[in-house]
Amino acid sequence: MLSKRLIKYFKSLQLKKYRHQDRKFIVEGAKGVSEVLQSDYVIDYLLTTKVYAELLPTDQLSRVKEVIEVTENDLKTVGTFQTNSAALAIVSMKDDSHLGIPEDQLVLALDDVRDPGNLGTIIRIADWYGIETIICSLESADFYNPKVINASMGSFTRVKVYYRDLKEVLSSTKLPVYGALLSGENIYNSQLTNNGVLLMGNESQGISPELVPYISHSVHIPRRGAAESLNVAIATAVILDNFFR
């Protein structure tokens, strides 16, 4: 049974201030919880319905520090989902103090992507294309926001996300930097490498002017219809697809 103290604590993790203060975050629903149980994340609490717990392998349950059987209403009270018939996990954040940019892979850099749904979807897209590293600007949405975790559909367990001053990162790398700009070369005609940094910009403003000088190859997706713009997550998918053709 959940105590009032634990309910208050778990609900506090919906706020960035308390997440980062305690270095804990929430994972909700059958898909997300299943993924995190199979990952190397440390799981402090697992709130689970009896039905869902019976479906979990014993070795996965043994990884959890404390398992608490709850009702669906308890899960709704503590989490952000309107309905949740499975589980909710309280997970420890990983150490992200050391940023390693692989020189033989493509890395994503996100400049001021503020919508949690967009960030979560981009993480899922990155996972689809085998991108292991994403570097976000300090102003970007919080990786541990429940909306980001939920939108990633479990891909947060396989993609490393760092927060850094992008100006410092881009000015120090020797890798080619591809930037999505309206003035860029047609992506379908571009010569693309299998390593480098792909820089995507803010949902409405695009890439910050201060970062443009660090772009060595600017690209754009040619418009054939009348739509004013593309969602940043969709644009990321289109561009990444061309890197791997």
Image (spheres, rainbow, N blue to C red):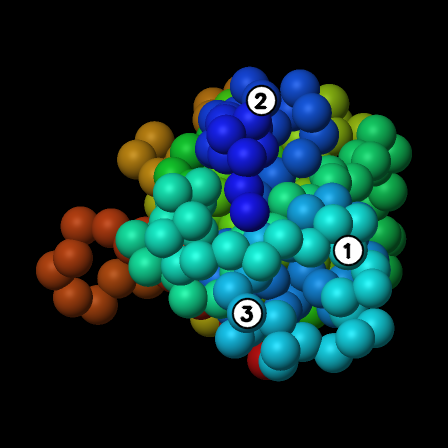
Could you tell me if residue 165 is visible in this image? Answer: no
> How far apart are labels 1 and 3 at the CA level?
16 Å
27 left or right of 206 in image: right
Mark closer to the chain start, 3 or 2:
2
The three-letter amino acid code for the residue at tag 3 is Lys
> How far apart are labels 3 and 2 at the CA level?
29 Å
Circle 3: element type: helix
Residue at position x 67%, y 35% from top? Answer: 24
Residue under label 3, please give it: 50
Q: Nearer the viewer, mark 3 or mark 2?
A: 3
* Residue lying at the far left of the rendered structure: 226
The three-letter amino acid code for the residue at tag 2 is Tyr
- Local packing at callout 3 (Cα closer than 10 Å; few below 14, some 14-19, many 20+) is some
77 left or right of 174 in image: left
- Measured from the top left, where is residue 210 in percent x and y? 54, 20
Mark closer to the chain start, 1 or 3:
3
In the rendered image of this protein, does residue 85 appear above or below residue 10? Answer: below
Q: Dividing the picture into quarters, in which one does residue 206 lie?
A: top left
Residue toward you, 4 or 234: 4
Circle 1: element type: loop
Mark closer to the chain start, 1 or 2:
2
Residue under label 1, please give it: 64
In the rendered image of this protein, does residue 241 appear above or below residue 83? Answer: below
Residue at position x 42%, y 66% from top? Answer: 85
In the rendered image of this protein, does residue 72 appear above or below residue 30? Answer: above
The three-letter amino acid code for the residue at tag 1 is Val
Residue under label 2, please give it: 18
Quarter the C terminus occupies: bottom right
